Image: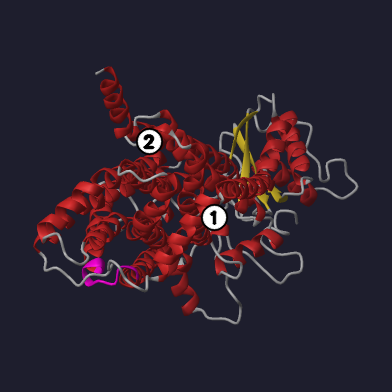
Amino acid sequence: NDLVRSIVISDDFTLTALFISLNKQASDEKLFQNILDLLEKYPGSEKVYFGGLPYLRLQISRDIRQDLSRLMTIGLILMLAFLYFSLKQLRGVLLPFLVVIMSLIASLGLLPLLGWQVSIPTILLPVMMIAIANDYGIHLVARFQEDHVPPFRYSKKELAQRMFSTLFAPVLLTGLTTIVGMLCLLTHLLIPAKQMGILAAWGVFFALSASLLLLPALTSFLPLPRPVVKENRAHKPRMEKLLFSTGQFITQHPRAIVGVAGLVTGAAAIGLLFIQVDSNADHYYRPHHPVVKASQLINSHFGGSQTISLVMSGDIMNPDLLTKIDEYEKRLSALPQIGATMSIAKVTRQMTRVLNDPGDSLYDAIPSDRNAIAQYFELYAMSGDPTDLEKLVDFPFENAQIVTRINTSSTPELKRLVKKIEKMTAGDPSVTQIGGWGLIFSELADLLVKGQLLSLIYAIVLVSALMMLLFRSIAAGLLSALPLLVSIVVLFGLMGFFNIELNIATTMLSSIMIGIGIDYTIHFLWRYKVERQSGLDYHQAVIRTLLTSGRGITFNAFSVIIGFSALMFSSFMPVRFFGFLIFISILVCFLGALLLMPAVVVLLRPKFLEPSFNRSVNTMAFMNTKK
């Protein structure tokens, strides 16, 4: 019986399936609780698996709630440990941590106020706030420690004023670029990504405001701590030695650094050819997870867990149209991605097999007379329940659907299948609609790619524009984009080489990476320009910048990396991959700011970084000559 075999009973008779249709008001939570109660009431030796979209929704919602609390706890513990290890002061821990807590409350508190639901992208929000919100405080505390050294020339109030005055512009710009990067998610075509962008931008804005206003105010009246950075020490700390050696190497070998960066970028670019897009929700979990196990069983024994339906319109009892439905079904069944099909034509042929002998012309065939077809359905209505057919045809017999079950969870295979079906039915007016979750997941893959490209383009353009405004130079925008472009190529190249798909989480990588990664370049260029204005030459300015701002940049980068590492403990594979990829991207941005950018500056010597007093000195010399 084709209506049963490989649909409700497996070919080897070891598995059977129960299909449950839900009404629109059904609650996933209540449904599965009732099912579990029934299983407990009638126990047996059989092993029961749950599959299908309602169960997947329920499992995802449960894991989201679990992830939110677990990842937030892990992130906070990691951040506290890192802050103390890096800044070695209690205030160096408490001040940035205070900003983190405030920004978490601000961003997560906005979620229910706007009436939005928690989704998989929302899992990233608390970890993102933990990783980003302390960055501005880290730079401020590092500057405080840099100024608070023997012989203690500044009072508490003066130290707070220096924190604010020297870092206001670069910290403000880094915050604005991060906000712009988050808001570029509004160009994404997925609503959860748009919502996450708004929530993250608001949280970063709150963290930026608290860092620039609250932290200097608190510093102005808190007791002065013991100095961490000491002048004229015989034994300098390892980080200072490393930064000094790095500065010397950069100034001596800038061409080698640029050349190596070019080779690495070129090699990584090859991986761009192998990037795959994955929109299948089954791949949210590890291979041994019950959700994946159930999906594999359904795909291999019951035709498939996803469906694509073709809606045919017209006089369904017309032999020509019913024959066309039958022909479509046969052609669809021959496609390798389709494990099972069902249609009103198959039901008709099954009835002819029951009511006719194998040698008859009507056996396993579509009757050529409309009245004969009508009689078959009349007999079925008299002997059975006509509502059995409501999933395949409407009661006026004006619309019918061919239901295909897809036996693969591969997004590329799904896209190829959709293209074959669209080509097969092109130009046929009787095929009025093509739908189903298989089609939705196929189109979702296209939306992921479009959203990634749009947010990437907007983020680079807007961040570069902000850099142009800050330094009043077009070259500044182009130069600052260089480490970002290298990071983007390396990031997506590695995704291609390691078969990490572009999915609902990783599709937000580019905007977030650009918004965060540009910070290190801003701090380097800003401090470098200050050192050049103080009279240092190119080589001296690079070394001095690395010894001062390089310390804060290093702490900043690794605080982001460690903060996002909490995502590696998520229940969802896309979120885990996001945590790994953000580690790679931020690391590349960090190396680009501390290695590639200084080397490029030494080689190109851009005019926008020239000391401003050069022009006034030249003017004074000209005036003296005239006199």
Disc 1 residue crowd, few under 14, some 14–19, many 20+, Cα 10 Å = some
Judge from the rendering whether residue 301 lies leftward or rightward of residue 92; answer left or right.
right
Look at label 2 and name its amino acid.
Glu
Judge from the rendering whether residue 52 lies leftward or rightward of residue 119; answer left or right.
right
Which secondary structure, mark 1? Answer: helix
Q: Is residue 350 magenta?
A: no
The reply to whether residue 570 is in sight is yes
Look at label 1 and name its amino acid.
Ala
Percent position (x, y) of residue 365? 81, 41
State the quadrant of the N terminus.
bottom right
In the current view of this chain or complex, which residue is farthest to the right?
359
The CA distance from mark 2 to mark 1 is: 53 Å
Mark closest to the chain's N terminus, 2 or 1: 1
Residue closer to the observer: 605 or 64: 605
Q: Is residue 91 magenta?
A: yes
Residue indicated by mark 2: 610
Taking the spot 18% from the left edge, 57% from the top edge, the residue there is 215
Judge from the rendering whether residue 236 lies leftward or rightward of residue 300; answer left or right.
left
Q: Are marks 2 and 1 in contact (CB under 8 Å)?
A: no
> Which segment did they paint magenta?
86-93
Q: Which mark is residue 281?
A: 1
State the quadrant of the C terminus.
top left
Q: Main secondary structure of the magenta part?
A: helix
